[in-house]
Amino acid sequence: MSLAAMTIEEIQRGLAAKEITAVALVKAVFERIKEVEPQVQGYITLCEKEALTQAEAIDKKIEMSVPLGKLAGVPIALKDNICTDGIKTTCGSKMLADFVPPYDATVVKRLKDADAIIIGKVNMDEFAMGSSTENSAFKATKNPWDLSRVPGGSSGGSAAVVAADMSVLALGSDTGGSIRQPAAFCGVVGLKPTYGLISRFGLIAFASSLDQIGPLTKTVYDSAVALEVLQGKDPMDSTSKAPQEINYVEGIKDGVKGMKIGVPREFFQKGLDPEIAASIQKSIEAYRSLGAIVEETTLPITEEGLSAYYIISSAEASSNLARFDGLRYGYRPEDFEKVEELMEKSRTDAFGEEVKRRIMLGTYALSSGYYDAYYNRAQRLRRKIREEFKTIFEKYDLILSPTTPALPFLCGEKSDNPLEMYLEDIYTININLAELPALAMPCGFSSTGLPIGLQIIGPHFSEGKILKAAYALEKDLNIVGKRPQWKEEA
């Protein structure tokens, strides 16, 4: 097996037994990047020299028997909206094309403390607004399973580089499904934690009450290890509210016997691809064979959440992106006479169409005369969604659902139809509105070989239970290790 294809678990064992070195691992990953990055287009910035220096330091620690961090030697890619000291952070936008932060995000500090090795920054939809990673100002990332298809978004770069073995671990951000949808499209594991479990300090905000950082990995076990490193209360983030640090690996193999899992019937109505429905049904039967109690239930507010999400997220985006005006930092046009013209030109030239669309939608929803009719009404619906989830979790330990209604779509297929693109989030947005944790994992493949993703949802701070259920299904399905294969495009 190629070193670049290793999991975190295998790297931990290999380094402990001195069967591999961190330097050899990093070199193998960069060789893989040179081989497939021209096709996948996953990275915006690479840090090869710095990564090799970090790897050499880890190998010296091993030689001297110095205790290692939990992610020692693990190559990691960071979504390009997570601030990195001295490394360009663009948010996939012309607005921040040359922005180099003077500090590390809290998650980056925690990764460095755990001896992880930063490989580079990966592509994303501009300011995390999109479901295909086609909205980037720099490039359109491709799905490693089929280069004619999208990898999902907005964390499409994160999912694609893990799927293509160009990184062992990647961080993404999830505002309405932006970790889980690309994880499903690219056949990897994507975890959106409970809001507040992982610090958002240093994450360039899209919608502050919805954004959450999370890991994308090759296996469920790897996701548990990453979460142990990333979790925890942070005094730099006022929304951080992790109750205590938890060992998620301990007990991950306990199984699901006696666990009650609800399957809302609303998730299996019109619009769901038949192959996805069939694959989810096989997973339901697998859980029953493993001793779980799986029952049909109802979550009637499923569809209504979509409208509330786009009003709330766009309103917060309008507020958060107001700082990008060409005055303090970011893109600045060469020709202008007045401050007003500077601001207008900088935002007109540097923001893409989707970002402009959401700023206008959010500004309208917050404007005088429409605030109560739209924004306040959406917030009331958000409270209703939280109450419905609270009620369902009084009866069930977890909820099972598809991650997406459709298989990965063709590049350019939905670019001219924003509404159709927004409907890709139908199964994921309510989880963000309710601040719940959810994990997306591969549960099968379509007749054409495309990955199919399943979503496991739990109550607040139930990541341990979600990971146990996901681990049990992963082992039962036995599809880990299947990697995409493709030929060079003509």
Image (tube, rainbow, N blue to C red):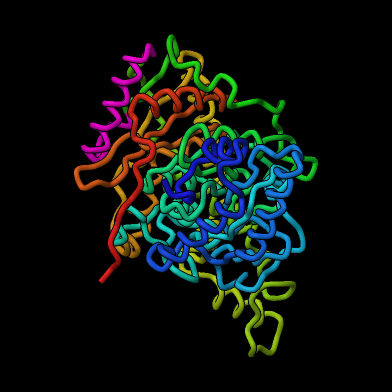
Residue at 45 percent of width and 47 percent of height? 5
Residue at 71 percent of width and 72 percent of height? 329
Q: Which residue lies furthest to the top in this view?
A: 258
Image coordinates of residue 32 in percent, x first then y, are 45, 59
Foreground: 176 or 278? Answer: 278
Q: Which residue lies furthest to the right in this view?
A: 235
**Quarter assignment of residue 417:** bottom left
With 410 as the anchor, is 57 left or right in this view?
A: right
| The N terminus lies in quadrant | top left
Image coordinates of residue 455 in percent, x first then y, are 41, 33
Up the image or down, 149 lies above or below 194; here it is below
Foreground: 215 or 48? Answer: 48
Up the image or down, 48 lies above or below 270; here it is below
With 420 as the anchor, is 15 left or right in this view?
A: right
**Magenta residue span:** 266-293
Image coordinates of residue 465 in percent, x first then y, are 53, 22
Q: Is residue 340 visible?
A: yes
Q: Can residue 367 be seen in this view?
A: no
Question: Magenta stretch mostly in which secondary structure?
Answer: helix
Q: Does the magenta stretch include residue 289?
A: yes
With 279 as the anchor, is 365 left or right in this view?
A: right
Up the image or down, 354 lies above or below 450; here it is below
Foreground: 291 or 334? Answer: 291
Image coordinates of residue 490 in percent, x first then y, are 25, 72
Residue at 28 percent of width and 68 percent of height? 489
